[in-house]
Image: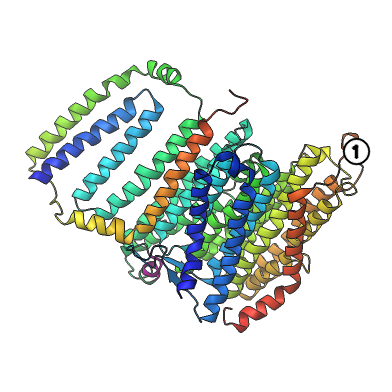
Amino acid sequence: MNYLNSVAASFILLPVAVLLINNILPKQFVEKRFQYLTGAVALCQMAAALSVFFMMDHAGLRTYNFTIFRNLPGSELFGIHPVSLVFLFCIGMVSLVSVMVANRTVDAKKSAYVNLLMTLLIGMNGMTLVNDFFSLYVFLDVVGLSSFVLIAMFRSRRALEGSIKYLIISELATVFILTGLSFIFMKTGSLSYKDIGSAVLTGSSTMQTVLLYASLILITAGFCVKAGAVPFHSWLPDAHQSADTSVSILLSGIVIKIAGVYGLFVLVDLFKGVKALQVSLAAIGILSVVAGALLALRQTHFKRIIAYSSVSQIGYILLGLSTGTTLGLIGSVAHVFSHAAFKTTLFTNAAAVHEQTGTLEIDEMGGLQSRMPVTAFSSAIATLSTAGIPPFAGFWSKLLIIMALWTSGSAVLGGFALCASILTAAYLLRLQKKVFFGKTPEHLASVTEVTGSVRLTEILLTAVTSIVGVFFPFILLYLQSKGLI
Amino acid sequence: MFMDIIIYISLAFLLFFCLMAVMSHSMLRSAIYLALASATLSVILYMLGAVWAAVIEVSACSGLVTVIFISSISLSKMGKEDVQKLFATKKQMGLLPVLLVFVGIALVILAVSHGFTLPSVAQEAADTFRTVFWDTRQLDILGQIAAVLVGGIAVSVLLRKDESEK
């Protein structure tokens, strides 16, 4: 058990250690090797998430509480459960991709990038590991602040505009969440998950009911802002477009999921019996799915299309959560993973195209398929996965969500979600057509395939999307045999 | 009695810091005064026995909000001269301390005439505060340290001039 505790503690201690190393060692030495340092942390995080899963399974544990400093008070404040392990694995995977892309896109300020990536990791890991809503709020603010500086650090006019917009809306969301939490605290006297779960539905006075619903509205709105769900999405396309692509990968691949979706996971888990919450999530979910796809259809900037696609895909995750069933939860968690895989692929494609062509306006491109075959192929696989075409990872997660909607009596929503996949295919095929097919403009005649870490990332992510898609039914069967489903 | 005096002194400090936050001609100083006001408020809350509120005030307002304010101010290009120009058109701000003194006197007269007294001060508050902040909110301290660290990184990244700018 000590070994399990040590591995679990590494989720917090490793980023702290790299943060210290980055600031102690000479700057030039660190900047030359920043990709190895940060890449190792990301890989270790993925390995640690898998190790903890198998160790917990071996010990027959469904949840595991641990401490990082054994001799200090407040032990067993962190907790791990299977859902948080999926999120932790995704954090590692997306961070690794971001580092590999940053190797090519971040020229100056590598040291600052490492510092901010590590604080972002501390914030995101902290959010998924805490057992208390107020601690979640504190780590949420660490995530928000780190993301803000990551967007702004390259100091272009557009980046500053995007970062300020993100900061203002994001902090408004945290105010909502904090106010909602204070209402819950007034009712329960504690913000620990276990205390809220048992106390929140007791008491039936009008005032208590009003407080409960007011807190739910505020917290749901706050987390939906962070997740970029419609109608709280206005910050997302600007922030994702204006940031460096390595940062966009982090934002779209994992930050919106941890800062927004994970909070909603916790909320749905604690307020299982509240029908209004499920209805609200279903409404926001379907609105995001449809509006995100329609807005993506109108865009002409590569990264902006993918950003609106994230809005739409977050809607699917919310729809799965809104069912309140185990199937819906599994579908949502699976979609968190598959979205992390295919969206980071598309952003890596954007980085590759930008590096080789110098533009991301799709109207200025065309015919890159013959000049950038690896990028075109990985982009096509990611598009198919996003649109929910079998046998890729996105197909299975969407199928589970639609099945969950169908079996929980929301057949209409399931139908809408199914039809929205056609819209997804439409805007992504338009992107494919404009960028990779058709006639090549003269100024792009000399374009060649991207090399180095960006190409390697594209190949690896395409393999992940395909392999997980092919083996998805077996993974589900394995989890079922272990009693986790 | 001793605790009552500390509360009165803290209230005076709170008023002073709030006033300075509004009156200061430097945005950065305003943000720092606001943080000090928030910290003073948390001292008052803790002495009045509202330990949890004090902890949250310290965690959320004094720490995180200040970091956000300072980061935003660092990003904005508005200098001291610009702020002073803005203030030049708002001369009525100078009357704010006078107004506050009058309101303060009115409140004291009201309190004395109605026999208001301070709520009883929680003597065990010190122990409770330590217990709450260290034993049960230990994780928040870690989060706070991370948040302050991000603020420091933000200031160093966003304020430092690039080679091209130099």
Specify whether residue A271 is in view. Answer: no
Residue range of the region highlighted in magenta in the rendering: A192-197
Residue B127 appears at what percent x and percent y?
20, 57
Q: Is residue B3 magenta?
A: no
Residue A54 in picture, x, y percent from top left: 57, 76
Q: Nearer the viewer, residue A134 or A18?
A: A18
A434 and A371: which is toward the camera: A371
Which residue is painted at 28% across and 50% down in the image? B54
Q: Residue at x 9, y 44 (%)?
A: B2
Chief SS of the magenta region: helix
Q: A386 and A376: which one is in front?
A: A376
- Crowding at label 1, few (<14), some or many (≥20) Cα neighbours within 10 Å? few
Quadrant of the image occupied by residue A354: top right
Left or right of A245 on screen, residue A20: left
Q: In the displayed image of the protein, which residue is found farthest to the bottom?
A: A481
Q: Looking at the picture, how far across and down is residue A433, in whole percent?
A: 85, 49
